[in-house]
Amino acid sequence: MKKLQVDFRKRLKNFDLQMNFAMEEGRLGILGASGCGKSMTLKTIAGIVTPDTGRIETGKTVFYDSAEKVNLTPQKRKVGYLFQNYALFPNMTVADNIAAGIRHAKRKDKRHRTEKQNVREQVKNLIEQFQLQGLENQYPVKLSGGQQQRTALARILVSRPDILLLDEPFSAMDSYLREELQIELDNRLKTFSGCSVIVSHDRDEIYKLCSHTMIMGEGSNIIFEETKKLFNQPRYMQAARLTGCKNISKAERVGPRTIRATDWGVEFCIDREIPKQLSYIGIRAHDFIPADVNDQRRENVIPVFPCGITKAPFEWTLLFQNKENPKGNMWMKQERGKEQIPEKVWVDQSKILLLE
């Protein structure tokens, strides 16, 4: 049975939020531009926001059903919600914040008594488990972003939620800290037996942490797929853009295996059937490679007209057009140490994305 099933509609100021997806135990990433309804989806699942119609349920509990007039309070949903700012109690120490989660769990489970000694022992164990030793008496304002995150996760997980919702968990982090905390969160979630939903606008974050990914447009899910499969073949133009494809052109079919990229003035050969719904093609910047100027046999070779170069510490970017028919710009990226301005570039047929 599915662990989380979501099907609801909520009228917002600028659009209708219409969500329909189901997931089993594991991690789902929701990827989308700012303002598309990602955080509102989490708040609706958690019961902070009430939809207009629909149904939200787990394998054992109905959270919301407009037809049956069911709408459980957030406290009864067994959902752990990690807010962007972690929402720690500012007037409580690390130990007290974690203890608050323990007492909250005890209140929901009347079979257990909340004893001070028992709480102290659990807090001590969690402090060790989340590597917060020495910070027990510190207040949130004195903690780093990573320490705040660990404290918030400890407080949430101690309540034994069935579902864990994480809203932009690394948005406030410096880049040097973000990768370390992504690894740390990945390790923490391996011990969580329920299903997790992670909202982000960072494609790398979703790719690293989530087994499945849902791409959101303005108020709806465009595609729901295994993460690696989705990144390899996004199928939709919006999905390709959100998964980092810089080169996207309108396209038209000109033969059984030939496509014309109208924005670039280039024709490409394709190694697979062209879908009837084809509207765009995409090529990731790293998939353009320098071509031998004397090699006349390769298909999908483009003579290069350079338009600009940028150099970052670890990669080099060339902005170019088709020299024989200058139109829209294309982007090519190379690793440091391989920098060159080629006379021609080439792309493998299998790397070309066919998009609706």
Image (cartoon, rainbow, N blue to C red):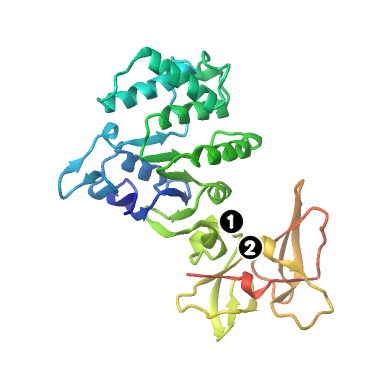
Of all residues shown, which one is farthest toward the bottom? 255
Element type at mark 2: loop
Q: Is residue 327 above or below residue 33?
A: below
In the rendered view, does 5 fall on the left or right side of 321?
left
Work out whether mark 2 precedes mark 1 in sequence or the reverse, and give the earlier one: 1
Say which residue label 2 marks.
Answer: 284
Q: Could you tell me how many numbered marks the image carries?
A: 2
In the rendered view, does 106 fall on the left or right side of 148?
left
Badge 1: residue crowd in 10 Å (few <14, some 14–19, many ≥20) = some
Which residue occupies 56% across, 84% down?
A: 254
Element type at mark 1: loop
Q: Is residue 90 visible?
A: no
Callout 2 touching callout 1 (CB < 8 Å): yes
Q: Hey, what amino acid is under mark 1?
A: Gly
Image location of residue 150, percent across then percent down = 52, 29
Which residue occupies 35% across, 55% down?
A: 21
Image location of residue 169, percent across then percent down = 50, 37
- Please tell me the numbered disc located at residue 244: 1
Q: In this view, does 182 lie above or below 340?
A: above
Q: In which quarter of the image is the N terminus?
A: bottom left
Q: Hey, what amino acid is under mark 2?
A: Arg
Badge 2: residue crowd in 10 Å (few <14, some 14–19, many ≥20) = many
